[in-house]
Image: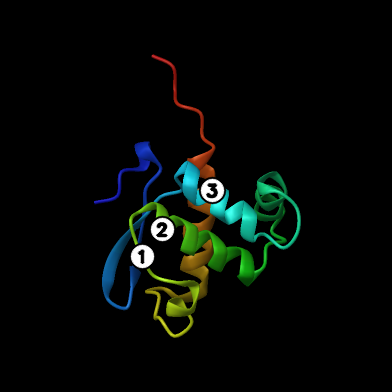
């Protein structure tokens, strides 16, 4: 089960439930892969609804890697994501939000 308090999000890929999480290492890898801008620019694209499918895929791959997945981006080209591209985009947005959410104070 995905734990939202630790930044985890679940996604079903090829019938298998995967846990995604943007760890510091996954965020660094993601930032290195971005073709334009920084992580702040990526967040702004999602907030403004101007993100691309490349942004969604990069976030999904980074989240999978942060969750322990050892695959490559090419492994997802023919993968079936339960719920399709809209669910993938929602999961990508949730990953970003949870990665930068400040914890509530006691």
Q: Earlier in the sequence, mark 3 or mark 2?
A: 3
Residue 103, position as x, y percentages in the image: 45, 26
* In the depicted structure, whether residue 82 falls above or below residue 93: below
Spatial CA distance of label 3 from label 2 is: 10 Å
Residue beneath label 3, please?
Answer: 27
- Earlier-in-chain disc, 1 versus 2: 2
Task: Name the outermost residue toward the top.
Answer: 106
- The image quadrant that residue 10 belongs to is bottom left
The quadrant of the image that shows the C terminus is top left
**Disc 1 crowd, CA 10 A, few/some/many (<14, 14-19, 20+):** few
Residue drawn where x is 29% and y is 50% of the image: 2
Q: Nearer the viewer, mark 1 or mark 3?
A: 1
**What's the CA distance linking mark 1 and mark 2?**
6 Å
Query: Based on the displayed image, in which of its 4 quarters is residue 76 positioned?
Result: bottom left
Instruction: State the mark number for residue 65.
Output: 2
- Residue 67, placed above or below residue 14: above
In the displayed structure image, the side of residue 94 where residue 37 appears, left or right: right
Question: Badge 3: few (under 14), some or many (20 or more) residues near its Cα, within 10 Å?
Answer: many
Q: In the image, 58: left or right of 98?
A: right
| Picture disc at residue 70 | 1
Secondary element at tag 2 = helix
Q: Is residue 89 positioned above or below 94 on the image? A: below
Mark 2 Cα-neighbour bin, 10 Å: few <14, some 14–19, many ≥20:
many
């Amino acid at each position: 089960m995905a734990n939202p308090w630790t930044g985890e999000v679940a996604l079903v890929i090829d019938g298998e439930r995967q846990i995604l999480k943007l760890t510091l290492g996954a965020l660094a890898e993601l930032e290195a892969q971005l073709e334009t801008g920084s992580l702040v620019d990526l967040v702004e694209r999602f907030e403004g609804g101007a993100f691309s499918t490349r942004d969604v895929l990069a976030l999904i791959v980074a989240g999978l890697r942060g969750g322990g997945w050892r695959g490559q981006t090419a492994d997802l080209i023919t993968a079936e994501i339960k719920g399709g591209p809209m669910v993938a985009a929602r999961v990508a947005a949730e990953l970003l939000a949870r990665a930068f959410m400040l914890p509530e104070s006691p």
